[in-house]
């Protein structure tokens, strides 16, 4: 080591500095990589000789840094594209589910909704092929515009109509038609506008115009609705079973007509066969019909207080009275409620329904006893609703 140190001390200054740099490179190869501060210190003492080494070291560090950043950026880009693809696939799956559900439940105007979902699917596939960076955003935005928004507006319009807020229902329907201008959406707008402007008479007149000028299915739908407005339950039953009206519109009215006519066994059987094909909201309405005509007051009150709480007060009073008279046709509270609705109900349909049901109760038309099969179906419905049979009103008061 001493001779080596002597020779090193005896070398010219430039050679000594280059030798030192060589040693430093050897240390780097063994894992002792110099820092940027080391290079700066080396350049400070011999700037004119150290510059080449400093430039070399800085260039190596810069390349390593940029290489890491490029790798990280590529990983992030791959992650973003994967997320976009997942979003597109998810939206396409939801579109397929919605289209299949509308077909299964027989909604009127379902082909318009199937077309809207198909547009979203096609745009999503094209975005995956040509604009992957934005595919998820584009597909989700189009899905919200063409499917989610109009469906939400139509649902809010339905709730407003149930509450008797016809002007609000018409305004919401206008926005829904702007986003989904199908023929059935426009028919709904015509009916709600007519009801908000001219009341029940305007609604009936609008149905008459649809019956005169609409398509085959639209005419059948208008005839069914007109029969219901007249409370012609025999006519409703015939038209609902004629297969000219879409399932979602016909089946609930068939079930109600059977109950209004006193065919309780057939009403329960019809509901049991149709239950799995009904939309959740329509299923709840049909359960209300069954529970009310079977005299299950507790079940009726729970439905009116929860799933069907959006109904207006007159409708709630009517169905509560029907349930009370279904349990005991001599119930004074039920009779008084129907008498009040028959005399002072806001719409002609409510007055007619109340008068008809009160007349049957006064005439002493007692329902026939239920079969074991009907009892099992009703018990299953009650268990599905987490309900128990309520005592009759006469014993509960």
Image (cartoon, rainbow, N blue to C red):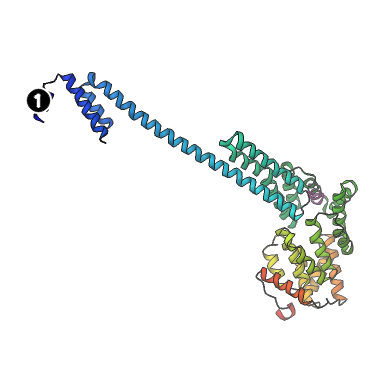
Residue 294 against residue 74 in the figure, above or below: below
Q: Quadrant of the N terminus?
A: top left
35 or 313, which lies in front? 35
Residue 24 against residue 390 in the figure, above or below: above
At a point 70% along the width and 49% down the height, the residue shown is 151
At a point 31% along the width and 27% down the height, the residue shown is 58
203 or 289, which lies in front? 289
Start-end of magenta stretch: 188-197
Q: Which residue is mark 1?
A: 6
At a point 72% along the width and 58% down the height, the residue shown is 279
Left/right of residue 69 with respect to residue 118 in the rendered view:
left
Q: Can you give x and y, in whole percent of width and height, for residue 63 in the image?
A: 37, 29
**Magenta stretch: residue 193 in it?**
yes
280 or 83, which lies in front? 83
Indicate the secondary structure of the residue bearing disc 1: helix
Residue 357 against residue 42 in the figure, above or below: below
Q: Can you give x and y, in whole percent of width and height, for residue 180 in the image?
A: 73, 43
Work out whether residue 321 can be spotted. Answer: no
Q: Can you give x and y, in whole percent of width and height, for residue 59 in the image?
A: 33, 26
381 or 85, which lies in front? 85
Left/right of residue 177 with respect to residue 61 in the rendered view:
right
Left/right of residue 47 with respect to residue 80 in the rendered view:
left
Q: Quadrant of residue 266?
A: bottom right
Left/right of residue 318 with respect to residue 236 in the rendered view:
left
């Amino acid at each position: 080591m001493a001779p080596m140190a002597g020779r090193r001390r005896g070398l010219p200054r430039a050679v000594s500095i280059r030798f030192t740099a060589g040693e430093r490179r050897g240390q780097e190869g063994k894992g002792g990589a110099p820092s940027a501060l080391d290079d700066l210190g080396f350049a400070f003492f011999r700037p004119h000789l150290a510059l080449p080494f400093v430039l070399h070291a800085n260039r190596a560090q810069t390349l390593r840094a940029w290489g890491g950043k490029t790798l990280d950026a590529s990983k992030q880009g791959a992650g973003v594209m994967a997320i976009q693809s997942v979003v597109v696939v998810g939206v396409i799956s939801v579109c397929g589910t919605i289209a299949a559900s509308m077909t299964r439940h027989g909604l009127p105007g379902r082909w318009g909704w199937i077309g809207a979902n198909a547009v979203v699917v096609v745009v999503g596939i094209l975005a995956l092929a040509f604009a992957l960076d934005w595919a998820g955003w584009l597909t989700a935005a189009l899905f919200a515009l063409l499917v989610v928004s109009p469906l939400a507006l139509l649902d809010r319009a339905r709730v407003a109509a149930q509450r008797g807020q016809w002007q609000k229902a018409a305004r919401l329907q206008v926005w829904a038609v702007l986003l989904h201008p199908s023929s059935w959406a426009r028919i709904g707008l015509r009916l709600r506008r007519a009801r908000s402007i001219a009341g029940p008479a305007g609604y009936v007149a609008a149905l008459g115009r649809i019956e005169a000028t609409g398509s085959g299915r639209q005419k059948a739908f208008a005839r069914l609705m007109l029969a219901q407005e007249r409370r012609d339950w025999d006519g409703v039953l015939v038209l609902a079973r004629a297969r000219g009206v879409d399932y979602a519109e016909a089946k609930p009215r068939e079930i109600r007509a059977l109950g209004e006519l006193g065919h309780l066994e057939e009403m329960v059987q019809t509901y049991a066969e149709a239950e799995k094909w009904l939309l959740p909201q329509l299923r709840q309405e049909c359960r209300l019909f069954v529970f009310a005509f079977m005299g299950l007051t507790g079940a009726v009150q729970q439905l009116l207080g929860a799933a069907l709480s959006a109904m207006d007060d007159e409708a709630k009073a009517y169905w509560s009275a029907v349930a009370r008279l279904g349990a005991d046709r001599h119930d004074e509270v039920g009779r008084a409620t129907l008498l009040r609705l028959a005399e002072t109900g806001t719409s002609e349909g409510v007055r007619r329904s109340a008068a008809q049901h009160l007349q049957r109760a006064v005439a002493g038309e007692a329902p026939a006893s239920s079969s074991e099969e009907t009892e099992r179906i009703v018990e299953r419905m009650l268990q599905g609703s987490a309900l128990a049979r309520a005592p009759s009103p006469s014993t509960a008061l």
